[in-house]
Amino acid sequence: MASSSTLLSATLPPRLPSSSRSPTSHITTTSLSVCSNHHNKRINLIGVANRNKLLCFSTKASTAAGMTTEKDVQVFDSEEALSISLAKYTADLSEKFAKQNGSFTVVLSGGSLIKSLRKLVEAPYVDSIDWSKWHVFWVDERVVPKNHPDSNYLLAYDGFLSKVPIPSGNVYAINDALSAEAAADDYETCIKHLIHNKIISVSESSGFPKFDLMLLGMGPDGHVASLFPGHPLVQEKKKWVSFIKESPKPPPERITFTFPVINSSANIALVVAGAGKAHPVHVALGNGEDSDVLPVQMVSPDEGKLTWFLDKDAASKL
């Protein structure tokens, strides 16, 4: 399938491998593809066999749209215990989808999420996961060069991608040579190309791309991806990928998946650690209140499953 995007030779960090992609690829680079109130809370205290997990409960919560969604909430004694559980969760889904579909589509975010994936690059997972089946995307990205300190790609490369043998052609970064608007359009074109090639599936209910696993962090203000409280983009219903030029958090220019794409995922993990994020967790999962509807409250998968991974500090107000 022909692509409308411009071929790019990206300037990447000097550590990156020098393998090149086929000229038929979507974009060519030296190393990668560019492209509530809760009710009926059921609490199970985890016994001696798993002291690191404080509690696990299912909750039916009212979302920002007034819908009710079931959430699996897991609270851990420490971020270290959280990261161990997150690794097993991710590895199990990798095995499931690799066998079922022949591929595993994973969407990363920035911030502390990458640190929480660190156990995947250790035994037993680094050797047992079939990394050749992984296809990696970003839920949002800053429109900066890939070797810039603000780049989510660079963060993921340093902390994760450089340590596992995912084929370079299966890593889909944005074309940072373009403007924010053009980069968003180009990334959406890339996703459509991969749907055509049956790498990414489509949600039968929404018609939006259906990624196997969406790994989300959350900011202290309750933002997810580059969808911020009160910003018009949180209401976007048609576009798959959009752009922002006046982000309230620097850098100002970014691209981001929209909520219809996020909520069409088969699995969503919301990974939140630290006392600084306890308030939005309380709003999303408890009876806390905020002057605005928080974007994290709008994470509500249409057909998939939402799992929260919290450390005890993030859950301290529940």
Image (spheres, rainbow, N blue to C red):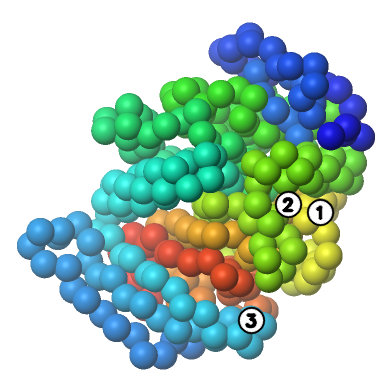
Query: Residue 313: in sight, yes or no?
Result: no
257 over 24 or under it: above or below: below
Q: Position of residue 89 (x, y in %)?
A: 36, 51
What's under tag 1, amino acid-wise?
Ser
Callout 2 crowding tier (Cα within 10 Å): few <14, some 14–19, many ≥20: many
Find the distance from the CA under tag 3 to the CA under tag 2.
20 Å
Query: Which comes sooner in the sequence, label 1 or label 2?
Result: 1
Depth check: 237 or 199 in front? 199
Q: What secondary structure is found at the residue carrying circle 1?
A: strand
Which residue is painted at 32% across and 47% down in the image? 88
Callout 3 crowding tier (Cα within 10 Å): few <14, some 14–19, many ≥20: some
Q: State yes or no: discs 1 and 2 in contact (Cβ < 8 Å).
A: yes
What's under tag 2, amino acid-wise?
Thr
The image's mark for residue 256 is: 2
Task: Tell me: 143 left or right of 19.
Answer: right
Q: What secondary structure is found at the residue carrying circle 2?
A: strand
User: Which residue in the structure is indicated by mark 3?
Assistant: 64
What's under tag 3, amino acid-wise?
Ala
Which residue is painted at 30% across and 51% down in the image? 85
